[in-house]
């Protein structure tokens, strides 16, 4: 009797599997089995056959799945059926962001949570353009457009990373337009009267010097948080802005590196900050962590953004302005007040460290419309 011919590489087999019958204990129904399809990928070194399998309710469904499987094989895609979108994102966050700060990675992870809640469990090789569109549309109901854009951008980058590893045929996220989300809270700028009220309320606060400096010089919150005493010259009445709390300590742009003259009220506030900090250092004793920073917690550690927002809102509430303000709006207010006083846009851009005067014009247009 002739020996049965072995199935060659890439050849298909389609058959009906009666052993695939299943029993539904809840309804006492018995399934009639399933159609199976198999593609042979040759043999391993030990002689064991290497196969990929698919299944379906009908022969036609199995043939369609085999056709798609062949397309993936031809494209070099080698994704396991259990490899999900969630797993692809996890791999991107772990491997695809070299040099990024841990905080940046966490921001990306948080941005993707609403999307993954919808499509995270879908096998990567099965996710479609419509799946991505549905996830983003769902997210748009509760999130702002900028937040949607960040999430969509992160998903596209994660799938591009998988695409580069031959884990998916195409980047379906790149084929979807970002939908519009909810209207975000517009940026606010203090009026002159509100600024005066804020400065008065801040006099007894630990943030007094911080508020004075940001409001009257336009330094970014991230720049003020990284400011060290080495870069403050109270005699010359200047500060040198050359660091930020961004990754690697870089400023936002090259033009953000600048030396600014500070008004006398800021000099006095910083002198008081020196005295306040000396007292806190003495009280903290061994708990004090010296970083040379101008603005710190009561034990010398750097301010985290959420702690800064919390303390800042206490001051705005005490000033009768409510608790919906955020520290970055001190800078917005500086630009607005400079523009109101007739300072040329180019000079405001230099003081604020904007990459170009176009950014300044955009900021003043928004604030003047308020």
Image (spheres, helix red, strand yellow):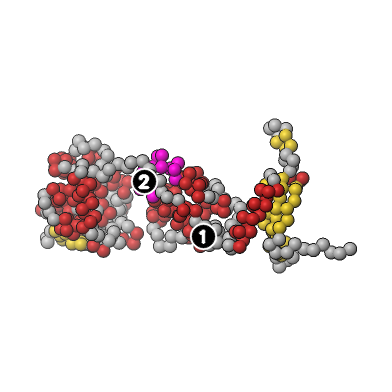
Q: Which dot marks residue 145?
A: 2
| Quadrant hosting residue 252 | bottom left
Q: Is residue 330 left or right of residue 155?
A: left
Quadrant of the drawing holding the C terminus: top left
Name the residue located 27 percent from the left edge and 61 percent from the top edge: 253
Instruction: Give the residue at the far right of this rendering.
Output: 1
**Residue 368 visible to an observer of this rendering:** yes
Task: Considering the whole magenta stretch, tell me its main secondary structure.
Answer: helix
The structure residue drawn at horizontal position 54% and vertical position 47%, both measured from the top left corner, is: 121
Q: Quadrant of residue 352?
A: bottom left
Image position, residue 274 (x, y; %): 18, 53
- Numbered circle sitting on residue 163: 1
Q: Residue at x 71, y 68 (%)?
A: 45
In front here: 74 or 311?
A: 74
Looking at marks 1 and 2 on the same chain, the residue that comes earlier in the sequence is marked by: 2
Q: Tag 1's secondary structure?
A: helix
Tell me where residue 355 appears, x and y as whole percent: 25, 60
Image quarter of the N terminus: bottom right
How many numbered discs, if any? 2
Q: Is residue 370 left or right of residue 289?
A: left
Residue lying at the far front in this picture: please name it.
60
Please give the range of residues in magenta. Answer: 136-149
Drawn side of residue 333 relative to residue 133, left or right: left
């Amino acid at each position: 009797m002739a020996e049965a011919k072995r199935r060659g590489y890439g050849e298909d087999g389609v058959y009906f599997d009666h052993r695939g019958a299943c029993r539904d204990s809840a309804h006492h129904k018995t399934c009639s089995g399933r159609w199976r399809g198999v593609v042979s990928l040759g043999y391993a070194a030990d002689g064991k056959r290497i196969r990929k399998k698919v299944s379906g309710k009908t022969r036609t469904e199995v043939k369609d799945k085999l056709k798609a499987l062949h397309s993936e094989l031809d494209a070099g895609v080698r994704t396991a059926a259990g490899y999900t979108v969630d797993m692809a994102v996890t791999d991107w966050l772990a491997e695809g962001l070299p040099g990024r700060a841990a905080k940046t990675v966490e921001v990306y992870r948080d941005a993707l949570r609403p999307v993954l809640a919808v499509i995270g469990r879908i096998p990567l090789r099965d996710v479609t353009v419509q799946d991505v569109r549905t996830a983003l549309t769902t997210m748009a109901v509760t999130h702002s457009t900028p937040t949607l854009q960040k999430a969509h951008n992160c998903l596209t980058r994660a799938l591009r990373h998988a695409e580069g590893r031959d884990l998916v045929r195409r980047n379906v996220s790149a084929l979807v337009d970002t939908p519009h989300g909810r209207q975000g809270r517009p940026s606010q700028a203090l009026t002159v009267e509100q600024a005066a009220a804020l400065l008065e309320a801040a006099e007894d606060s630990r943030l007094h010097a911080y508020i004075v400096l940001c409001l009257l010089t336009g330094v970014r919150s991230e720049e003020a948080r990284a400011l060290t005493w080495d870069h403050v010259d109270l005699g010359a009445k200047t500060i040198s802005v050359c660091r930020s709390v961004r990754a690697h300590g870089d400023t936002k742009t090259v033009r953000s590196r600048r030396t600014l003259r500070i008004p006398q009220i800021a000099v006095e506030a910083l002198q008081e900050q020196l005295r306040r900090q000396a007292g806190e250092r003495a009280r903290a004793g061994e708990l004090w962590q010296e970083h040379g920073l101008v603005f710190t917690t009561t034990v010398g550690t750097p301010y985290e953004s959420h702690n800064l927002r919390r303390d800042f809102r206490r001051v705005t509430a005490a000033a009768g302005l409510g608790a919906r303000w955020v520290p970055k709006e001190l800078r917005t207010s500086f630009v607005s007040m400079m523009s109101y006083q007739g300072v040329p846009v180019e000079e405001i851009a230099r003081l604020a460290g904007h990459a170009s005067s176009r950014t300044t014009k955009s900021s003043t247009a928004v604030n003047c419309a308020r």
